[in-house]
């Protein structure tokens, strides 16, 4: 039987000719402190226990949660196992992705897992697993996509009515180690075009004021790092307002009829 | 009826078919007699169609297929039949389009060829792929290969025939500029850049057939006198085909084992192991711009020629680029041989160990076939390029030559070993990402791995073996991941440890231990550094003490619906999304969807009606009329006459069956006479009228669908194409007619899904696909 999942090109084809790629133009019109506007929708998937859709300009992420459900493994676990599956759609990046999950996607999955697991009360659900499926429909910058995926996953967990101590929101910042420049919520062009070699991505629980996970790249003095962390936290708090708003909206909808 | 309409109709009927659950059909049949009859007539017509189709292909298969279960049980036969039909249709279409052509050169399938075809799928015996016990031929080289990391490679050529810029000038230039020392310029760069292909190339010519490989014996060249003889003949040729066979498993840098050269008359096979130092003489031919050198996939060949013999190629034509420009579906030499010469090249020998001397006959033939047909292929490609150039109004020939120029300008450069960044094709970074990304985890493992990689490279250089031979990548990763403490640990990793790894097993353990030690030292150093930072008491995080160490303290500001928060939210919230429509709740959407479904259910028409078959007509027209149709369709009749059709007999109820049997006993009436009397279409229509009257008497409320079908039968009988467009839709009629039905005003609509009971899902799950039933259709 032929492979129906993939669409291969015709056997006879001529490659397209591209013009010389232009120098990237900075498209950022936002303030360095300002993040992109966010659209968040919860409970769109009827078959999943919880779901959320996160969109901020070009970033589009859909996330569904199933569980807590009985764990597939036989080994006894006193707390629930959180599984995150991060997937980039083939068309989500400027270079086409394959269908098989890449190493990069797997490492992203682990990062998201690490960022949101402190917020969930996993010990309340023994012998069960919570599966979070994150599908990136469109991405715009690796850092911002990761941060958005964290927020999206956490809001889906909330939508699934899984007990949490708080919600995690992600935020990202790009910085130049040699100068004082930094850019909150960098997009793809920022990442490619700026000579910046440093970045911070963070998961933050806004109401408790705890950082769940932080990834830093590039050399950075302690004072600079604390400054950037503060910027990240401010951004994460803002994102939290959006999640709260969406949750309230969803709650009122379910109570209305 | 054109294709798009047919497709649309097909789509519609498929959609409507799926509206009705299959399991519910018996229920409706029992509840509504009209529906029951409709279904019956449709399925009987299907059966007829299937039977007819099968009998056209294979009569024996069509026998005693009576009902649906028979088809299920004998699915293999049905699908076979369909396969045959599709196959035939494909073949006929190809034939009609003229795609089936005889190959240009008829190669006679010799006895050896037939013998070769059988073990095609088998792997070559290992001794042919790797002759392990061969003494290394590089030991006999007059100039020993230098494998050291510091070695600076320099050109091998001593003189420069057909030069525009003399060699001395380039040497002087290099001496002046020491930066060129590491990346020498291409000695023939000006000559290649300024080369123009001879004008006769761009003229159409008849391809010159060089005959089969078996007709010409290759000339083995292994002495200097033989080489000079060959050179003399090559100098008189206009074009030559060249190919190389290379070996790089039992040598660090690799060497060329064989060079095949063909002109129009002869095939030479040069033993480059013997003539390694003498072959530079070939530059007289290779750099002559008036002789076209045809290669296939010369990317590596060009580099090997430089490295081993100091040979350079001016006016190269790479047939690989020609296949690219012409947009062929295959780009390999095997594809071209298949396309133009109908020669099945045994590409297994590509991987063979070409150091073996004397060469076995099969390998010799393979080597010869690589270049033997290449000039003939070149003729074809040239003609095709010229004709396509005129079509596309661009010079494709020039573009192929330009691509080939870029290839012949490639330079051989040594790849330095990069211990720090691990760059290069065999560098540690490349190997790590390809094989070890899941096994080498953590800094310690990485350090061990890098040390082992370095060790492997140095051993390979020392022993003059390839890194693959010393320690395959897979093993390298496995050893690095398992951190062996003693020699036995290494042996336990793999049973197939390479001989070199066995020899150096103590070294491997030592390397691993040293890397571990180095890592521990580094960790200690970092720890002490970290402590110093702590001593300075610089806060790393922004949190105050109370926040990190104290009890959970909830910052409620994020929950408050304060003015500040609200204005902030305004700046953060997007107006809408590309995906979701705001203001429309899920329930609204669901409601709208339900309404649409209801409308669809209200008027389900069968957009595609079935053609009537002879069998159907027979059953419809009942007893008397069967003879008429038989007469009308004598071609079918001739076959059918002997055996009465079983389907109808069993399909009808008992009374009808009896009568039909009776009827079949007396088809003795002179058929031809009747045919003369009444035109077939007339006959059937008159019959239909009778039938109509009969039906009306029976049931005035019922529609006379069957009669309509009969009236439409006439074109079929006349063997004219069936008119789908004008066919009436019996289900649509059924819908429009429900008002008159006995079920009252609304009538009973069996296709109305809204009123359907829920499907019995359990029963659906139970059903299993019977064995042998393929689902590929």
Image (cartoon, rainbow, N blue to C red):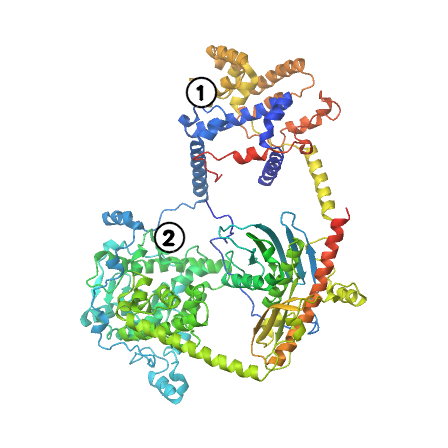
Q: Chain of mark 2?
A: B
Crowding at dot 2, Cα within 10 Å, few <14 / some 14-19 / many 20+, comes out as: some
Residue at 49% of width from left, 50% of height from top? A74
Report the front residue among B121 and B559: B559
Left or right: residue B469 compared with residue A47? left
Report the front residue among B511 and B345: B511
Whole-Å distance between the Cαs marked 2 and 1? Answer: 47 Å
Residue B327 picture location, percent across and down: 46, 57
Residues indicated by labels 2 and 1 sit on the same polypeptide chain: yes
User: Any mark on residue B640, and which?
Assistant: 1
For marks 2 and 1, give the one nearer the viewer.
1
Is residue B81 visible to us here? yes
Task: Name the residue carrying label 2.
Answer: B339
In the rendered image, the vertical position of residue A102 relative to residue B189, given as above or below = above
Residue B109 picture location, percent across and down: 27, 47
In the image, farthest residue toward the right: B563
């Amino acid at each position: 039987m032929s492979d129906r999942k993939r669409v291969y090109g015709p056997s006879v084809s001529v490659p397209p000719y591209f013009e010389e790629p232009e120098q990237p133009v900075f498209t950022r019109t936002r303030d360095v402190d300002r993040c992109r506007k966010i659209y968040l929708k919860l409970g769109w998937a009827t078959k999943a226990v919880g779901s959320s859709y996160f969109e901020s300009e070009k970033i589009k992420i859909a996330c569904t949660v199933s569980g807590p459900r009985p764990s597939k493994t036989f080994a006894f676990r006193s707390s629930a196992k959180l599984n995150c599956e991060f997937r980039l759609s083939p068309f989500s990046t400027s270079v086409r992705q394959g269908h098989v999950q890449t190493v990069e996607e797997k490492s992203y999955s682990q990062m998201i897992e690490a960022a949101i697991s402190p917020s969930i009360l996993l010990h309340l659900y023994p012998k069960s697993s919570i599966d979070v499926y994150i599908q990136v429909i469109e991405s715009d910058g690796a850092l911002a996509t990761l941060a958005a995926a964290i927020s999206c996953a956490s809001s889906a967990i909330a939508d699934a009515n899984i007990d949490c101590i708080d919600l995690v929101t992600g935020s990202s910042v790009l910085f130049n180690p040699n100068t004082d420049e930094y850019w909150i919520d960098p997009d793809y062009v920022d990442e490619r075009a700026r000579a910046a070699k440093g970045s911070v991505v963070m998961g933050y629980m806004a109401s408790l004021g705890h950082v769940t996970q932080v990834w830093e790249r590039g050399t950075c003095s302690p004072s600079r790092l604390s400054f950037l962390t503060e910027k990240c936290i401010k951004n994460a708090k803002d994102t939290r307002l959006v999640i709260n708003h969406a949750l309230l909206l969803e709650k009122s909808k379910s109570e209305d009829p | 009826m054109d294709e798009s309409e047919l497709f649309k109709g097909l789509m519609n009927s498929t959609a409507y078919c799926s509206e009705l659950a299959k399991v519910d059909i018996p229920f409706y049949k029992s509840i509504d007699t009209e529906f029951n009859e409709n279904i019956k007539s449709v399925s009987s017509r299907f059966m007829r169609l299937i039977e007819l189709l099968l009998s056209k292909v294979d009569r024996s298969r069509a026998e005693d297929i009576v009902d649906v279960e028979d088809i299920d049980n004998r699915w293999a036969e049905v699908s076979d039949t369909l396969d045959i039909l599709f196959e035939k249709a494909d073949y006929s279409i190809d034939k009609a389009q003229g795609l089936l052509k005889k190959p240009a050169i008829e190669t006679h399938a010799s006895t050896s060829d037939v013998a070769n075809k059988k073990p095609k799928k088998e792997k070559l015996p290992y001794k042919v792929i790797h002759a392990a016990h061969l003494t290394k031929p590089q030991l006999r080289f007059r100039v020993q290969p230098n494998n050291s990391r510091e070695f600076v490679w320099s050109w091998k050529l001593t003189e420069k025939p057909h030069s525009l810029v003399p060699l001395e000038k380039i040497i002087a230039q290099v001496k002046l500029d020491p930066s060129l020392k590491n990346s020498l310029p291409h000695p023939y760069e000006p000559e290649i850049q300024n080369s123009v292909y001879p004008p006769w190339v761009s003229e159409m010519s008849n391809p010159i057939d060089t005959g089969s490989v078996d007709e010409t014996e290759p000339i083995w060249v292994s002495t200097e006198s033989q080489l000079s003889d060959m050179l003399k003949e090559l100098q008189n040729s206009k074009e030559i085909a060249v190919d190389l066979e290379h070996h790089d498993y039992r040598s660090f840098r690799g060497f060329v084992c064989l060079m095949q050269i063909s002109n129009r008359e002869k095939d030479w096979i040069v033993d480059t192991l013997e003539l390694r130092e003498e072959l530079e003489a070939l530059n007289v031919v290779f750099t002559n711009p008036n002789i076209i050198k045809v290669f296939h996939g010369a990317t590596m060949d060009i580099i090997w020629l430089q490295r081993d013999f100091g040979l350079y190629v001016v006016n190269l034509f790479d047939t690989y680029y020609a296949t690219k420009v012409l947009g062929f579906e295959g780009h390999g030499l095997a594809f071209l041989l298949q396309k133009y010469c109908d020669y099945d090249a045994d590409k297994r020998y590509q991987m063979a160990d070409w150091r073996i001397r004397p060469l076995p006959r099969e390998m010799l033939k393979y080597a010869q076939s690589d270049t033997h047909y290449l000039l003939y292929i070149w003729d074809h490609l040239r003609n095709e390029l010229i004709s396509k150039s005129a079509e596309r109004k661009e010079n494709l020939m020039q573009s192929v030559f330009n691509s080939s120029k870029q290839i012949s300008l490639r330079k051989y450069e040594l790849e330095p070993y990069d211990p720090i960044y691990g760059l290069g094709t065999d560098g540690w970074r490349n190997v790590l990402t390809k094989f070890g990304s899941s096994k080498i985890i953590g800094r310690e493992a990485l350090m061990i791995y890098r040390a082992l990689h370095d060790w492997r490279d140095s051993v390979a250089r020392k022993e003059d073996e390839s890194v693959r031979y010393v320690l395959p990548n897979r093993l390298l990763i496995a050893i690095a991941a398992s951190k062996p403490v003693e020699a036995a640990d290494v042996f336990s990793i793999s049973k197939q440890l390479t001989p070199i790894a066995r020899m150096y097993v103590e070294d491997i353990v030592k390397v691993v231990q040293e890397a571990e030690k180095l890592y521990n030292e580094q960790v200690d150093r970092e720890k002490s550094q970290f402590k110093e930072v702590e001593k300075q008491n610089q806060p790393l995080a922004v949190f105050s003490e109370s926040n990190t160490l104290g009890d959970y303290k909830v910052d409620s500001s994020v929950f408050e619906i304060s003015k500040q928060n609200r204005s902030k939210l305004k700046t953060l919230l997007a107006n809408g999304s590309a995906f979701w429509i705001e203001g429309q709740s899920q329930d609204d959407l669901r409601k709208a969807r339900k309404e649409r479904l209801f409308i669809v259910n209200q008027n389900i028409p069968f957009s595609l009606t079935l053609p009537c078959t002879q069998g159907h007509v027979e059953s419809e027209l009942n007893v008397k009329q069967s003879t008429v149709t038989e007469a009308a369709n004598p071609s079918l009749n001739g076959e059918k006459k002997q055996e009465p059709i079983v389907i109808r007999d069993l399909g009808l109820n008992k009374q009808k069956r009896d009568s039909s049997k009776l009827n079949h006993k007396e088809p003795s009436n002179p058929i031809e006479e009747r045919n003369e009397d009444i035109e077939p279409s007339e006959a059937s229509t008159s019959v239909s009228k009778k039938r109509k009257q009969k039906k009306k008497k029976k049931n005035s409320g019922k529609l006379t669908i069957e009669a309509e079908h009969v009236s439409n039968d006439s074109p079929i009988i006349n063997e004219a194409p069936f008119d789908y467009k004008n066919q009436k839709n019996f289900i649509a009629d059924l819908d429009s007619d429900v008002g008159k039905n006995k079920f009252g005003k609304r009538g009973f609509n069996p296709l109305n899904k809204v009123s359907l009971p829920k499907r019995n899902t359990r029963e659906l799950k139970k059903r299993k696909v019977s064995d042998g039933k393929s689902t590929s259709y």
